[in-house]
Amino acid sequence: MATNLRAAAHSALRHVFGYSSFRAGQFAIIEHVTRGGNALVLMPTGGGKSLCYQLPALLRRGTTVVVSPLIALMKDQVDALTQAGVAAAVLNSSLSAEAIRATEAKLLAAELDLLYIAPERLAKPATRALLERSQLALLAIDEAHCVSRWGHDFRPDYLALKDVINRFADVPRIALTATADAATRADIVQQLALEDAYQHVASFDRPNICYNVVDKANAKKQVLHFIQRDHPDGAGIVYCMSRKRTEDMAAYLQARGINAQPYHAGLPAAIRDKHQHQFLQGDLQVMTATIAFGMGIDKPDVRFVAHLDLPKNLEGYYQETGRAGRDGTPASTLLTYGLQDAVSLRRLLAQSTADEAFKRVETQKLEALLGYCESVQCRRQVLLAYFGETLAEPCGNCDTCLNPPKTWDATVAAQMLLSCIYRSGQRFGAGHVIDILLGKATKRVLELNHNSLSTYGIGTDHSDTTWRMLLRNLVATGYITTDADGYGVLKLTAQSAGVLKGKTQILARQVAPARARDKASQQTATRRVRTLEPTAVEPSQEPLWTALKALRTEFARNQQVPPYVIFRDLSLREMMSTVPTSLAEMRSITGVGEVKLERYGQAFLDVLNDHRVAESNTDEPATEQLLPTSHNKKMMMIAADGQHRRVSDLAKDVSNAITTASSTDETVDNIFANPAEDSASDDADVLGDTLNLIYAGCSVQETAEKLGITVKQVQTHCLELIKRGHLTPREATELAMSDLEAIEQVVFSLAETGRVSPKQVYTALEQRYSLYDVRCVYTALEQ
Ligand code: ADP
Ligand code: ZN
């Protein structure tokens, strides 16, 4: 029997799904469930949960009912199963009465292997009566964390499952989720009566995802740069806290040439569906969305997930970021995090009308999230520890591993801050408290006579930025609290006393110069993503790759399914590397089961074959294919000897300068600690202010407004800062990487012909960029 089951499972795996072996854990679950046992499966996104019930569905007599929370998810799964030749259908509110009747008839005639149902439909007496007349093989509860109030996606409809389970107690059940901390897991077991279930808890680690958290300065711009720099072509999701923000962000990205659309529950269903459809089809690069978007989105090639605002808690964060890189190839995430986020989340929680126990749990979860953001430890270690897993070594693929943060002993500074909050009466927010520390004679300070406080002006050793970071750290770690009304009023806590008495040491992250951060991430995260970017293929393979994708798109369009439902990228890549020449060879490609082989095998073989013939007809490789990309061109120019020496030296110096500047970990504070060594006549303080604001994400215009000086003056400062190596053109302008490269190109090519001036570059570029933009690039190269 055992070998029979194993053989039958393998045969179905091979012939229906086109896979050659089970992933770790899958077979044990499948065996247990096929024999009639219950199971609870916790596997990360992309781990292969679906197979754990789809295969038993094929092996057991009767129909497997799959409870799934989202119509989109059901449709995707049913499409994929139908493509593989499995009899699957869906019952949900989006169908016509006629379609529903047809599906019900099939169910009663025992013609369905799998039936996907939304929980609210399952709760209806009519549906139950229908199921009672059918033969049920298995009950699969997908996204099972939705049953728990502790989970971040609680859906009251899932509670109706309890009754269904009671009614069909003799039908085996399997609950699956990609997210569940200990409390949620226990709750799932209780709610779904899985005390006797076989539990499979896979490692939650997603090693292909690179986690990044950045200080929120100008979040939109930070996300824009992240996309432009790391994912110029890759699909991604930008999560936002509100509906309005998703729309603003989409417009912001669109205005900067990125194909983005919003998704939130307030949009008309037709628009929502359209955007989702475009995203799944690969026709839309970026979805800016609330958390309404994503659960069950099966798109395997999402390359990045960015959070414009803090997520609600770590489970939510892990689930949302988990939508990146389901295909197992490199992906990255960005979370922008600022004090205001923590304040708003605290306020929401305080204002919630939920009971105290609930609020307590939520507060702990918020603390864990803030702790994650502030952590100086490997992000993955913190995340996995939260899910009860231990990662022995730092991962080497997160921002803290790749660019370890420096810490400083901030105990004395923390004492100043706490005492300033206390002395000003615990009635003010961050801005005012920091103004006092910095001894700023603002109107408010003078009105309140706060210039006579003993803490007035005692904090001038640190910058505004440093104070804000420290403050946020102390709020996140519970040494300072913000009022429940949400005005950001700072108050001391019971823990504060330890710091004030000198019993507690405070270690804080040092503010890294933006440039060092930028460069570190370019060198590390970017390099990983770029060089391993799974969409990149060898230039010589490009035509074949394009042809295979075009064929896939054609099939997908005709059948109105996403391209990956026909074949995943992985399958197409395998076709390119192994080049099957017959249907028999095609059969061994991952993801090619019998039905897909019959439907598409020959068409794909033809494309492979045509390509082979075309290649053997060409004696010399086509010169166009060897033409360097603009990037390579630059490298060639730089590497060339003789007359290009000057250009090459120029470039080398620039890269040396960047390396030196960022490896000495200057803080914003001490960059100007010793301005005397520079003979420039600019007042170092004013330059420092400009630098701080630019680092904080302000544009030149905004900096001018904040400092009350002219745009021209700020531009002069920026040019000086670039000259001194403290700023990059990227930071000093709004230019995209491609613009910078375009300007560089012209500088390089004019340099080849002799002396070159910014004005000449500006003219050669037909005034497409401002003279200031050109100057910035020119000055950096000159350095
Ligand atoms: P989950 O539901 O856990 O997020 P899926 O069930 O969608 O993940 O599986 C993720 C991907 O892995 C899918 O492309 C799926 O077809 C593939 N997969 C699952 N099991 C196997 C296997 N044994 N061999 C090869 N690919 C598999
Ligand atoms: Zn790490």
Image (tube, rainbow, N blue to C red):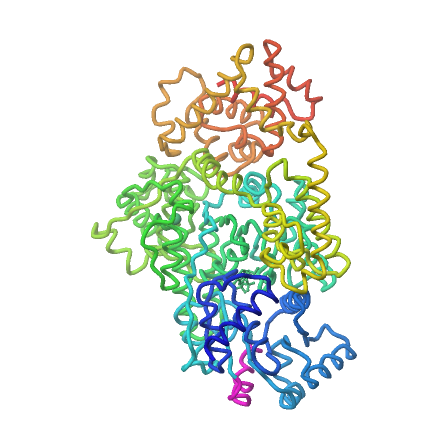
Q: Is residue 341 above or below residue 403?
A: below
Tell me if I can see residue 249 in this picture.
no
Q: Is residue 542 magenta?
A: no
Quick check: 510 left or right of 212? left
What segment is highlighted magenta in the picture? 156-171
Q: Nearer the viewer, residue 459 or 277?
A: 277
Q: Is residue 161 magenta?
A: yes
Q: Position of residue 236 (x, y in %)?
A: 59, 50
Q: Is residue 730 above or below residue 656?
A: below
Q: Position of residue 497 (x, y in %)?
A: 25, 56
Q: Position of residue 758 (x, y in %)?
A: 61, 17
Q: Nearer the viewer, residue 65 or 740?
A: 65
Q: Nearer the viewer, residue 729 or 300?
A: 300
Q: Nearer the viewer, residue 619 or 115?
A: 619
Quick check: 126 left or right of 454? right
The residue at the point 35 percent across, 40 percent down is: 510
The residue at the point 57 percent across, 72 percent down is: 54
Q: Is residue 743 above or below residue 38?
A: above
Q: Position of residue 155 (x, y in %)?
A: 55, 74
The residue at the point 56 percent across, 41 percent down is: 221
Within the image, what quadrant is residue 726 found in?
Answer: top left
Tell me if I can see residue 503 in this picture.
yes
The residue at the point 52 percent across, 58 percent down is: 320
Judged by its main secondary structure, the magenta piece is helix
Count of labels in the image: 0
